[in-house]
Amino acid sequence: MKRILSLALLTFAVICLLAPVAVFATEETAPAAAKAADASSVKTMAALAAGLAIGIAAFGASIGQGMGLKGATEGIARNPGASGKISTTLIIGLAMIESLAIYALLVALGILINQKMFF
């Protein structure tokens, strides 16, 4: 099972790395109308990339926060005396997870600002 999952993730990574080559490969002798269509295509891909970045980051952050909260509640249930230390560690961990989601938001906004689609 792990081998199939690893192969699927590797294939997905290769496709993601090679997709821009097909999208951005254009001829230099294209007419002005075709260049305008290519610019529109780039903006469309930028918007899609920004949306996917936020979606994947939100999904990952929510899974991570859920797992962290699950572990903290189980730890407090087993040892109520350590609830102070567990809660402090949980809050710090949740802040770190949320900072990664905010970083993904900044990357997505950077993509949109670079294409002059935002601000």
Image (cartoon, rainbow, N blue to C red):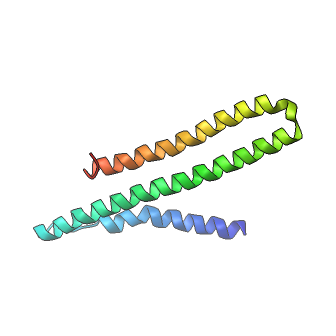
Residue 30 in sight from this viewpoint: no
Left or right for 80, reference 22: right
The residue at 70%/49% (across/down) is 67
Observer-nearest of 47 and 91: 91
On the image, the x and y values in percent for residue 84 come to 77, 29
Left or right for 40, reference 110: left
**If the image is split into quadrants, where does the C terminus sit?**
top left
Q: Is residue 114 above or below residue 76?
A: below
Quadrant in the rendering for residue 38: bottom left
Observer-nearest of 12 and 93: 93
Observer-nearest of 11 and 81: 81
Quadrant in the rendering for residue 51: bottom left
Left or right for 93, reference 119: right
The residue at 40%/55% (across/down) is 50
The residue at 46%/63% (across/down) is 16
On the image, the x and y values in percent for residue 68 come to 70, 45
**If the image is split into quadrants, where does the N terminus sit?**
bottom right
Quadrant in the rendering for residue 25: bottom left
Left or right for 43, reference 3: left
On the image, the x and y values in percent for residue 81 come to 86, 30
On the image, the x and y values in percent for residue 77 come to 85, 42
The residue at 11%/67% (across/down) is 32
For the image shown, how many numbered marks are present on the structure? 0
Residue 42 in sight from this viewpoint: yes
